Image (cartoon, rainbow, N blue to C red):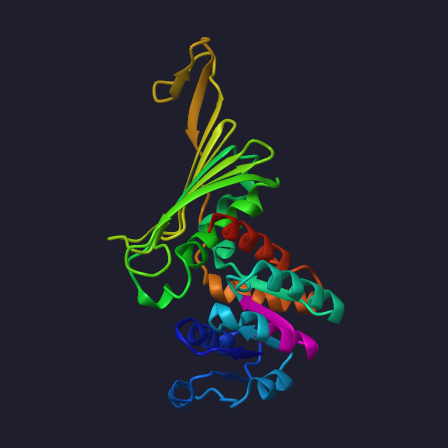
Amino acid sequence: AGVLGAGHLGKIHLRLLHQSDKYNLVGFYDADEENAKKVAAEFGYTYFNSIDKLIEAVDVVDIVTPTLSHYDCARKAIAKGKHIFIEKPITNTVEEAETLRTLVAEYGVKGQVGHVERFNPAFIAVKDMLDKPMFIETHRLAEFNPRGTDVPVVLDLMIHDIDIILSVVQSKVKHVSASGVSVISDTPDIANARIEFVNGCVANLTASRISLKNMRKTRFFQRDAYVSVDFLEKKCEVVKMKDAPKEPGDFDMILQNAEGIKKQIYFDNPDVAGNNAILDELESFADAINNNTKPIVTLHDGTEALRVATMII
């Protein structure tokens, strides 16, 4: 594998690919020569002074460059028959993303998008319990960090939650309404969106990068269950309802509706296994290549998340 981009996230990818048993890290390229030489000297990774040389030397190209250059980097790699792992958002425009999907099919290579929250252990723990949720609420709030402000907060933060929601709600988007406010940046720093799906599900998303505290929570409401996922603290909570027993115990929680139907509330919190989500997503891509299986987050998934994000913007 080779990495394009050795910024904050690029350095994390370099370290994890270097330590992974499933990859042999060949080296990296970064447009900022001064930064590249510093990274090479500090960590001992091989620096390539051109994108083309790096692409030639590897099987997998890991694209961790600014979003604006994702498309050009990916196109070059695919044209050389290389598999691509591409950070989110997949590209700058939906048209570019669609083109990459066509090229990947044409050249017979695999592609995966870095929607890392799919690998969050708290989400993995409850994923199989989510069954046709009809209302979803997400809050992704971050303290201000100038690193992300080259794109609107929808593409920087909210897109994580858009991807999670689209992976859970197997239905087409019917309508999107949204509002956003620019406070510090030239693009919105805080945004709220309401996504309505054809099957009746509604998702309400809030994202901010000017918050006083960090928060990444999603709540799913479905028939007879409430599921809460804390992506930041890696915790989850599952509250379920079932028909109340004829003779409830002293500590049973019983609810009765206006029609007199009684339900018992109980907690069913699954265990959350510790993991490194970025390492897991990278290694899952290696597995998809080695076993010729579908990547967990496909270019199609990345394109659809970007499509909805664009509708919101």
Q: Is residue 187 magenta?
A: no
Task: Tell me the quadrant of the picture where the N terminus can be found.
Answer: bottom right
Q: Which corner quadrant of the image does residue 276 belong to?
A: bottom left
Picture residue at 24% right of the left edge, 53% below the top: 212
Closest to the observer: 107 or 247? 107
Q: Quadrant of residue 301?
A: bottom right
Magenta part of the chain: 73-86
* Residue drawn 34% across the image and 18% down it: 250
Residue at point 65%, 66% (across, down):
100
Whether residue 217 is visible here, answered yes or no, is no
**Does residue 227 appear in the picture of this structure?**
yes
Residue located at (70% from left, 68% from top): 103
**Relative to 156, residue 49 above or below:** below
Task: Classify residue 83 by image quadrant.
Answer: bottom right
- Would residue 63 appear left or right of 263 to someone viewing this image? right
Residue 256 drawn at (x, y percent): 41, 14
Looking at the picture, tell me which residue is in the foreground, 73 or 26. Answer: 73
Residue located farthest toward the front when viewing the structure as drawn = 186
x and y percentages locating residue 139 in the rendered image: 37, 46
Q: Position of residue 145 (x, y in %)?
A: 31, 64
Q: Is residue 67 above or below residue 209?
A: below
Instruction: Tell whether position 83 is magenta.
Output: yes
Residue in front for this viewpoint, 47 or 148: 148
Q: Is residue 175 above or below residue 82?
A: above
Q: Residue 51: where, in percent of width, then height?
A: 56, 84
